[in-house]
Amino acid sequence: MLKERSWVFALSNKYLTIAQNAVQKATSGGAAMAEAFLLSSKELSIETRDGEVETMKLAEDRGMGIRVITDGRVGFAYTTDFSSGGVDQVVHQALANGANTEPDTHYTLPQITDKYPQLDIYDPAIRGASVENKIKMAVEMEKVAKAHDNRVKIIESSSYQDGEMEVSIVNSLGMQAHYQGTYCGIYLSLVAGEGEDSQTGFAMKYGLKYADLEPIMVGKKAAERAVRMLGAKPVKTQRAAVVLDPYIATNFLGLLSPALSGEAVQKGRSLFGGKVGQQVAGELVSVVDDGRLKGGIASAPFDGEGVPTSETVLIEQGQLKGFLHNTYTAAKEGIRSTGNGVRGSFKSTPEVGTTNFFIRPGQVSADQIIQEVKNGLYVTEVMGMHTANPISGDFSLGAAGIWIENGALTKPVRGVAIAGNIMELLGSVDAVGNDLEFFGGKGSPTLRVASMSLSGS
């Protein structure tokens, strides 16, 4: 353990030295402000089929992005060559690129005065676990699913994945920041069949701790989801209550994330533009982005610009409170960044994006929410979410799930469509469950919508 920590410390010192050197060269070369962003990452993915490894990939990536700002002109370049010559070349390229851009006085770099939060985001057990044990986890999910019900016929994907990343940022305003993080996860998708009918099911578990992965639970849940849909048929066209399970509610939440970006508002591409202080959802709905959430897979002490992460309440009890910002969009509004300058890699500059983005859980159980429904649809699958319009909020989707009758789940339903607008949907939420579940960086509890149009047979 001591050797592991000393190695990490030595590596972080090395990266910070490289970043400091790059920033010094950029400012000596004429940049008014300069920033170096270093990322080193490893990702392991294992997929099994019929108890054997089908694919196993280990990908490593390491590089540095240089951003320079002079008189509002931004230049950017990146490299994977950390030698002295490589650093000289990328700095020269960033300076040259900046000379050819349009000036914008809102471009700046953050000067950090706040402390970074102390987060538990590195689990040495992920690296410490053998590849054989990681393979066993994927194989176990398969076995559990098949043993759970003999109607489980095909395993489409049984996979284990983990990743490790090290991030260092230095800028010419005195910032020096570094962290190391890990994540891991398992995923299972399968097909159940009976006669000529076949239905799909999936389950997953992603998080920061290796010990929290539950292959038995994932295997059972995927099998149950597929089997319960066998024999699904349409229902007649009607208006009815609709209960969204956490995965489906999270899908709808994904429609909101672009609209709650300060960048989208400034470009006139948000359905929430000009609505701060207004009621945009039911009073039970609160939407939060929290980059320092305990256990959150997207948690980090700072964002892609080195700004400390924070909890940002975007919608509180249905009222729109504000938007997500990076340093640039915040400067345009005369406010502080919310710590949402995210980077996909060292090859890009910071965009505005979400971290751990979720709907706050309520006080009632999912079972109680369903028990209060006389007639309605418990939606467990939607098709065509990619066709929904994130600017207008309009959607028209295929849906499947279980019919609710007198408070009980009765028969599987498929071949219906639900249509509407995300603002109307949020405004009609009349119950929020206590079962918040994350799917990657987004999460939601069970939601009940008082009434929606169902197009069926």
Image (cartoon, rainbow, N blue to C red):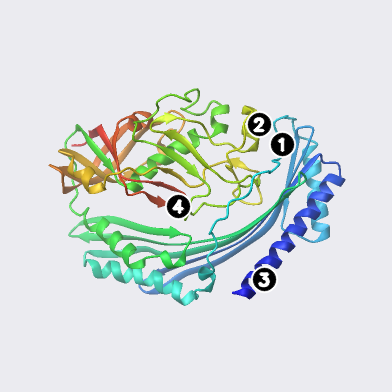
Residue where numbered disc 1 is placed: 108
**Looking at the rendered structure, which numbered label has been put on residue 6?**
3
Q: Earlier in the sequence, mark 3 or mark 1?
A: 3
Residue where numbered disc 2 is placed: 331
> Residue 3 is drawn in which quadrant?
bottom right
Which residue is painted at 26% across and 41% down in the image?
A: 243
SS assignment at label 1: loop
**Circle 2 or circle 4, nearest the eye:** 2
Q: Is residue 75 visible?
A: yes
Q: Is residue 245 above or below residue 132?
A: above
* Residue 259 position in % (x across, y down): 48, 33
**Circle 1 or circle 4, nearest the eye:** 1
Q: Is residue 43 above or below residue 408?
A: below
- Give the distance between the C-alpha atoms of the residues marked 2 and 4, in whole angstroms: 30 Å
Q: Earlier in the sequence, mark 1 or mark 4?
A: 1
Mark 2 and mark 4 residues within 8 Å of each other at the beta carbon: no
**Looking at the rendered structure, which numbered label has been put on residue 440?**
4
The one nearer the camera, 36 or 231, is: 36
- Give the distance between the C-alpha atoms of the residues marked 3 and 4, in whole angstroms: 31 Å
Q: Earlier in the sequence, mark 2 or mark 3?
A: 3
Q: How packed is label 4: few (under 14 Cα within 10 Å), some, or many (20 or more)?
A: some
SS assignment at label 3: helix
The one nearer the camera, 197 or 300, is: 300
Mark 2 and mark 1 residues within 8 Å of each other at the beta carbon: yes
* Residue 48 position in % (x across, y down): 41, 69
Q: Earlier in the sequence, mark 2 or mark 4?
A: 2
Count of all numbered marks drawn on residues in the image = 4
Q: How packed is label 3: few (under 14 Cα within 10 Å), some, or many (20 or more)?
A: few
- Give the distance between the C-alpha atoms of the residues marked 2 and 1, in whole angstroms: 8 Å
Which residue is painted at 38% across and 40% down in the image?
A: 252
